[in-house]
C-alpha cells in the first residue's frame, strides 16, 4: 500500500490498483477544464482506479454536483471508497462508488450524466459508443477522454490504425496532430449517429498520451456539419515538406515539386481548441497553486496562440535538415513571417514546431532572412 498526497488530496493506493504519479499534470489540466465549464456537472469517472482523478475534480470544483466513481477492479473500488471517506470534508458533491463494467453501466444509465470521464489503458474506442449513447438523451454534454494508443494513431503500426480507426496515419513530423485528428474523426462519426454535433474544446498531446475534451450538442444539421469535418484528408510531400488539407480523397497524387504525395485520413479537419475555455483555464490556473502551475500556464498559452492558426504544423528542425539550412531561433523566424504579413505561432505539440499560413517556400525565405542564430 502506498500512501500519498496529490494537490492536497490524500490517497491510499494498494499495490494491485493503478496509479500513475506522472499523470498529475493531466489531472490538473483536466480539473482546470472542469472549473472553466459554465455548467453544473453530474460526473461519471468511468475508470476511476483509486479515485484520484474524480476526487480532484470534486474537491477542486464547486460546479461538480454529483460524482460516480466506477471501476471493474474490486480492489480499486474498495480503495476508492476509503479515499472518498478520507477526503469527504473537502468536497460537497454527492458521491457514490460502483463496481461494474463501464460499458454495461453506461448502457443502463443513459441520460444520468452530463460529463463522462474515460481514462482507459490504451484505446478509448471500445467505450466510445456506450459513452456517447449514455450522453445522448441530453441537449448538451461533455466527454473527457484519454488515449494511450498513440503509437497506433501516429502510424508506428499503420495496419492497426486502419483496423481500429478506419484511417491511414502518417508517421511524419506532424504525426501527433494527425493522430489527434484521427481519434476526433472516430468520435465525431459515432456522435453523429446520435444526432450530436462534436465540438472539440481542447486537444492535448503530451508524453505517451492524448487527452481530448469534447462538447456534444443535439441537432441534426450541426451533426451533419461535424460528420463532414470528420471526413477530411491531409496530403504530404516528404521531399519538399509541402502539405495541405482537403475534403477530397483524391485531391492529387503528385506534388508540384514532382515527388509523389502521401496522404493521411480520414481525419478531423475542424478546430482543436476553444479560446474562451483556454482563457478561463489560464485565469483559474493563476488562482490555484498546482505543483505544475508553470508548465500548465505555458501549455495553455501555447494552445491559445495556436488555436486559430492553420492545421498541420511544420517542424523547423526538419526544414533545416531537409534544406541544409543553418538553424535559426524560432522567435526570429516567427517575427520574419509576421513581418511578411503571415500568421505564425508555436505549437504545444512539439517544441520545434510552428503553425503558419505561409507555405514551405516562404518559410525557407523567412529562415534565410531572419537574424537570430
Ligand atoms: C488508466 S487506469 C485509470 C486511472 C485513473 N483515472 C487515474 O487518473 O488515476 C484504468 C482503470 O480502468 C479500469 N477498467 C478497465 N476496463 C474497465 C471496464 N471495462 N470497466 C470499468 N473499469 C475498467 C481498470 O481497472 C483501471 O483501474
Ligand atoms: Zn513536394
Image (cartoon, rainbow, N blue to C red):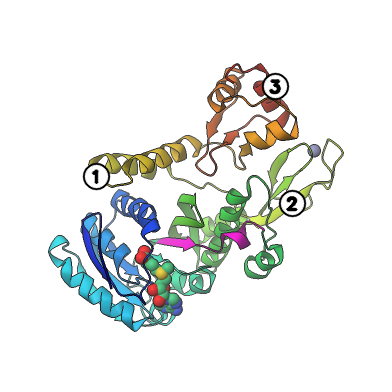
Residue at the (37%, 83%) spot, across then down: 100
Q: Nearer the viewer, mark 3 or mark 2?
A: 3
Q: Quadrant of residue 86?
A: bottom left
Tell me the quarter of the picture where residue 278 sits: top left
Q: How far across and how far down the image is residue 122, in percent?
A: 52, 68
Where is residue 217 shown, x and y percent of the image? 43, 59
Image location (x, y in percent) of residue 372: 57, 19
- Check residue 263 in the rendering and tell me which mark sits there, or answer none: 2
Q: Secondary structure at mark 1?
A: loop
Instruction: Report whether 132 appears left or right of 58.
Output: right
Circle 3 packing at 10 Å, graded few (<14), some (14-19), many (20+), is few
Secondary structure beneath label 3: helix
The alpha-carbon separation of the residues under discs 3 and 2 comes to 26 Å
User: Residue 271 in the image: x percent, y percent?
Assistant: 53, 46
Q: Quarter of the image holding residue 58?
A: bottom left
Residue 304 lies left or right of residue 312; in this view the side is left
Q: Quadrant of ligand 2?
A: top right
As rendered, which of 137 and 130 lies closer to the eye?
A: 130
Position of the N terminus, as image quadrant, is bottom left
Q: Which one is in front, 43 or 346?
A: 346
Specify whether residue 327 is in view.
yes
Is 209 located above or below residue 44 in the figure?
Answer: above
Whichever of labels 1 and 2 marks the residue nearer the N terminus, that label is 2
Q: Quadrant of the C terminus?
A: top right
Would residue 138 be seen by someone viewing this image from the given angle? no
Which residue matches tag 3? 365
Callout 1 crowding tier (Cα within 10 Å): few <14, some 14–19, many ≥20 = few
Cα distance in 3D space between marks 1 and 2: 44 Å
Residue 291 included in the magenta stretch of the image: no
Question: Residues in magenta?
Answer: 143-155
Kindly identify which residue carries mark 1.
289
Q: What is the total number of numbered labels drawn onto the structure image?
A: 3
Amino acid at each position: 500500500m502506498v500512501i500519498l498526497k496529490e494537490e492536497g488530496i490524500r490517497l491510499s493506493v494498494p499495490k494491485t490498483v493503478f496509479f500513475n504519479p506522472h499523470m498529475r499534470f493531466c489531472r490538473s489540466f483536466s480539473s482546470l477544464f472542469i472549473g472553466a465549464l459554465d455548467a453544473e456537472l453530474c460526473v461519471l469517472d468511468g475508470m476511476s482506479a483509486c479515485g484520484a482523478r474524480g476526487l480532484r475534480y470534486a474537491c477542486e470544483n464547486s460546479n461538480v454536483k454529483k460524482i460516480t466513481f466506477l471501476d471493474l477492479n474490486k480492489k480499486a473500488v474498495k480503495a476508492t471508497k476509503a479515499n472518498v471517506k478520507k477526503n469527504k470534508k473537502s468536497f460537497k458533491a454527492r458521491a457514490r462508488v460502483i463496481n461494474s463494467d463501464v460499458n454495461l453501466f453506461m448502457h443502463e444509465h443513459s441520460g444520468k450524466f452530463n460529463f463522462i470521464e474515460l481514462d482507459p489503458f490504451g484505446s478509448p474506442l471500445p467505450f466510445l459508443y456506450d459513452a456517447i449513447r449514455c450522453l445522448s438523451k441530453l441537449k448538451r454534454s461533455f466527454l473527457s477522454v484519454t488515449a494511450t494508443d498513440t503509437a497506433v494513431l501516429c502510424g508506428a503500426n499503420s495496419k492497426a490504425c486502419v483496423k481500429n480507426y478506419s484511417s491511414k496515419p502518417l508517421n511524419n513530423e506532424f504525426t501527433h496532430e494527425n493522430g489527434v485528428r484521427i481519434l476526433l474523426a472516430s468520435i465525431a462519426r459515432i456522435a453523429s449517429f446520435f444526432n450530436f454535433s462534436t465540438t472539440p474544446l481542447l486537444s492535448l498531446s503530451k508524453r505517451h498520451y492524448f487527452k481530448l475534451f469534447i462538447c456534444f450538442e443535439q441537432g441534426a444539421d450541426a451533426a451533419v456539419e461535424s460528420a463532414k469535418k470528420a471526413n477530411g484528408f491531409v496530403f504530404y510531400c516528404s521531399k519538399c515538406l509541402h502539405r495541405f488539407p482537403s475534403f477530397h480523397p483524391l485531391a492529387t497524387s503528385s506534388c508540384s515539386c514532382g515527388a509523389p504525395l502521401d496522404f493521411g485520413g480520414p481525419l478531423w479537419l475542424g478546430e482543436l481548441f476553444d479560446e474562451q475555455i483556454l482563457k478561463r483555464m489560464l485565469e483559474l490556473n493563476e488562482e490555484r497553486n498546482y505543483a505544475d502551475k508553470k508548465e500548465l500556464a505555458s501549455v495553455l498559452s501555447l494552445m491559445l496562440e495556436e488555436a486559430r492558426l492553420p492545421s498541420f504544423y511544420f517542424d523547423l528542425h526538419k526544414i533545416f535538415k531537409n534544406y541544409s539550412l543553418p538553424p535559426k531561433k524560432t522567435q526570429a523566424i516567427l517575427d520574419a513571417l509576421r513581418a511578411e504579413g503571415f500568421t505564425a505561432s508555436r505549437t504545444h505539440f512539439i517544441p520545434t514546431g510552428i503553425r503558419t499560413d505561409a507555405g514551405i517556400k516562404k518559410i525557407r525565405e523567412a529562415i534565410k532572412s531572419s537574424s537570430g542564430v
